Image (cartoon, rainbow, N blue to C red):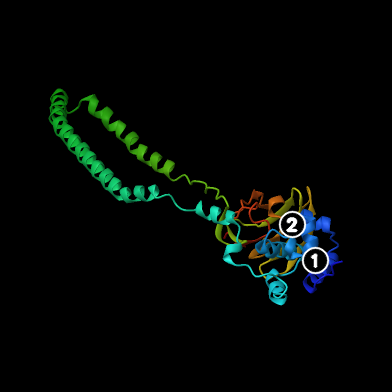
Amino acid sequence: MFYLTELGNRLKEAREAKGMSLDDLQRVTKIQKRYLTGIEEGKYDMMPGKFYVRAFIKQYCEAVGLDPEEIFEQYKSDVPVVYNEDLPNQLSRVQSRKIVPSRDSKFIDLLPKILVGLFIIGTVVLIYVLIAKNVNTSQDKPKDDIGSETVNYGESKNSPLKNEKKGEEPAKKEQPEKQKEQKQVTKEPAIVKQELTSVSTSGKNSTYQLKNADKFTLKVSSSGSTWVNIKNGSGKSFYQGTLNRSQSQEINFTNETAAVLIIGNAADTDIFVNGEKLEYSISPVQTVTQNVTIQFAKAQ
């Protein structure tokens, strides 16, 4: 018969205080029930490895509303120490995929040369067009002079043609005024679309920034079962609890500077900002528990 350790008793009390059974905790954390029981009873030898012991305890704490770092410090004698060799091999494989291909650097090295070549070609074309235009203008001028002299010889001082031309001059002067009126038509200001961008990521923490928006409506919905805690930038909690399938919470943060979300099961949690779905910058499949911060500066 196994007895609860001090750490296991602390975790169990926090779980029962939230009214959660081991089955509820299994749905939220995606950790098998037998491992959750092993954590409460201190049977760490049944875990896949020391790394998983700390990882499972951390997810257990976050699901029941405890600070994992505080728990690790207070019960450090009960929690196994993790060394680099205990890390799963899959972590090293994930990191190796993030290496930037070297062929991109070759293109970056050639980019200045390409730009210089395009600039030279554009300059040559521009000079050619200007020279051709000046040549055509010089050839057309004598023809215009001859035509004007022919008209002058054929007209007398009292020619009705001159009177007609004089009568047409006011009409020609009115055209520029109409063009000015058309140019003075005011353009309607373009509609500015809100910007929701990722600012930084570190471990399970990610920060986003909301710009060009005059309001901030946050909606959190669940496609399975997830525990969430929604707070403002000062730490005031607006909602804390478990959202089951098709359940959601919508909160107006327009008068706040930030919204902070502690999510127990990010894979089954969708976040919407003013109707726009937030794309996780940290994979919710690889990192189930996440802390998401959305900074907001109201558009002037």
Q: Nearer the viewer, residue 159 or 3?
A: 3
Left or right: 242, with 109 as reference point: right
Q: Which mark is residue 171?
A: none
Determine contact: label 2, label 1, CB under 8 Å. Answer: no
Answer with mark 2 or mark 1, whichever residue precedes in sequence: 2
Residue linked to disc 2 = 29
Q: To which quarter of the image does residue 4 belong?
A: bottom right
Is disc 2 placed on a helix, strand or loop?
A: helix
Select label 2 or label 1 by which is in front: 1
Question: Badge 2: few (under 14), some or many (20 or more) residues near its Cα, within 10 Å?
Answer: many
- In the picture, the quarter occupied by the C terminus is bottom right
Amino acid marked by disc 2 = Thr
Amino acid marked by disc 1 = Glu
Give the CA separation, mark 2 to mark 1.
15 Å
Residue 190 drawn above or below residue 68: above
Q: To which quarter of the image does residue 66 belong?
A: bottom right
Q: Which mark is residue 40?
A: 1
Left or right: 142, with 272 as reference point: left
Is disc 1 placed on a helix, strand or loop?
A: helix
Q: Nearer the viewer, residue 71 or 272?
A: 71
Q: Residue at x 32, y 48 (%)?
A: 111
